[in-house]
Image: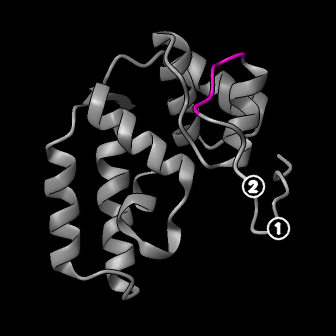
């Protein structure tokens, strides 16, 4: 979601909705998010998709938003969610936070959305559509 906010060719209405809600209400993310964002910015900077200045500006903007880093993961549940839904442990951490904290899951990832639906976690917005207007299959 967050990369959609800073990469022009990654814009998505669901990401825009997530940003608006984050600005208004804040968001809870697993602590791995801190590293994932910085890694994604570094990778995209190396690929020439954004400049160092844009990466710094993105981090500064994110710093003004109310992100709560969650450090209280249930490690057994994270592993079970990863196994059961075929998720990476990183993605399962997002699902675990949403389950434990009873908050909606905001993601553009089809597999993670499907896992959230199966786990009866509320999802932010409708399933994203591909450029032809079809909903992606998990």
Q: Quadrant of residue 8?
A: bottom left
Q: In this view, does 58 lie above or below 135?
A: below
Q: In which quarter of the image is residue 87?
A: top right
Query: Picture coordinates of residue 127 (x, y %)?
Result: 72, 42
Q: Do the residues labelled 1 and 2 touch (CB within 8 Å)?
A: yes
Which residue is located at x 75 percent, y 25 percent?
Answer: 117
Q: Mark 1 packing: few (<14 Cα in 10 Å), some, or many (20+)?
A: few
Q: How many numbered circles are shown?
A: 2
Give the Cα separation between the discs numbered 1 and 2: 8 Å
Which residue is located at x 73 percent, y 31 percent?
Answer: 115
Instruction: Using residue 7 as the reference point, say whether residue 90 is left or right of it.
Output: right
**Frontmost residue, 49 versus 42:** 49
Residue carrying label 1 = 132
Which residue is located at x 39 percent, y 76 percent?
Answer: 44
Query: Picture coordinates of residue 28 (x, y %)?
Result: 36, 26
Which residue is located at x 38 percent, y 52 percent?
Answer: 36
Residue carrying label 2 = 129
Majority secondary structure of the magenta segment?
loop
Secondary structure, mark 2, is loop
Query: Picture coordinates of residue 83 (x, y %)?
Result: 73, 31
User: Which portion, as a residue range, is magenta?
Assistant: 120-124
**Frontmost residue, 77 versus 118:** 118
> Any magenta on residue 7?
no
Secondary structure, mark 1, is loop
């Amino acid at each position: 979601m967050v990369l959609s906010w800073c990469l022009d060719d990654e814009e998505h209405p669901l990401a825009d909705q997530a940003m608006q809600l984050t600005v208004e209400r804040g968001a809870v993310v697993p602590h791995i998010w801190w590293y994932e964002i910085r890694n994604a910015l570094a990778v995209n900077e190396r690929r020439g998709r954004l400049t160092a200045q844009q990466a710094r500006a993105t981090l500064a903007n994110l710093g003004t938003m109310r992100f709560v880093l969650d450090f209280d993961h249930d490690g057994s549940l994270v592993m079970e969610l990863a196994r059961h839904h075929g998720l990476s442990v990183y993605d399962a951490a997002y699902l675990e936070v949403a389950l434990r904290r009873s908050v909606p899951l905001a993601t553009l990832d089809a597999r993670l959305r499907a896992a959230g639906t199966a786990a009866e976690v509320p999802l932010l917005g409708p399933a994203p559509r591909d450029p032809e207007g079809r909903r992606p299959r998990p």
